[in-house]
Every structure is written in structure tokens, then in C-alpha cells.
Image (cartoon, grey):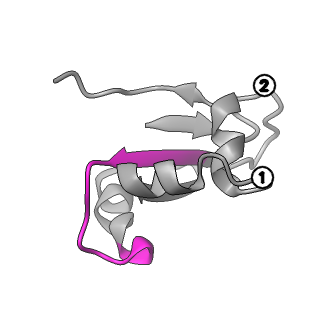
Amino acid sequence: MILFGSHAYGKAKKGSDLDLLVIVKESSLPRYKRSVPIYKALAGILVPKDIIVYTEKEIEEWRNVPLAFITTIGKGKVIYEKQD
């Protein structure tokens, strides 16, 4: 899980949302449905959130595309990483 955006860069202001990228091995769900269970799990955290879920394959496909959203993630902070 990667924190990016204003909170990761030390520029958060009152009302700033948490921008989170979750990377999963694979998923059969369309991208817009993947974050639903994560929003539900974090429902008790009363901070505005923007949660984006990509598969490992999608990250690789977009990693070197100039101006792609994924390229900004390199500036983010890993806040959770599953150990195999």
C-alpha cells in the first residue's frame, strides 16, 4: 500500500484526503469495483480517502508511460507491504 499525494509529500492541509494505492497480484474485478472492500474496512477512519487498486500487471504496463498516473507513485511512501 502506497501513500501518495499531499500527505506523502508533507503538504497536507485541513481537509486533505488520504491518497492510497493498493497493488494486488491479480483481480477479476473491474478497477472501479476493486476498492469497495477496502473502503468498507476503513469506514471507521473518519478521514477523506481516495483508494485506487491496480494489479501488478497494470503497474508494469503503465510504469514507463510519460505523464501516466503511475509515474507519480514513485514519489509516494510505502506504508504496508505484505511479506511472502
Q: Residue furthest left?
A: 84
State which region is magenta.
Answer: 19-33
- The secondary structure type at the circle numbered 1 is loop
Question: Which labelled disc corresponds to residue 10?
Answer: 2
Image point 22% across, 21% down: which residue? 83
Location of the C terminus (image quadrant): top left
Eye-nearest disc, 2 or 1 = 1
* Residue 43 appearing in the image: no
Q: Where is residue 36 in the image (x, y as percent from the top left)?
A: 35, 68
Task: Name the residue type under label 1.
Answer: Pro
Q: Nearer the viewer, residue 44 or 53?
A: 53
Q: Name the residue under label 1.
A: 66
Q: Earlier in the sequence, mark 2 or mark 1?
A: 2
Where's residue 74, x and y in %?
65, 32
| Label 2 crowd bin: few (<14), some (14–19), many (20+), radius 10 Å | few
The percent coordinates of residue 33 (x first, y second) are: 36, 75
Label 2 amino acid? Answer: Gly
Q: Split into 4 quadrants, where in the image is the N terminus?
A: top left
Q: Is residue 20 magenta?
A: yes
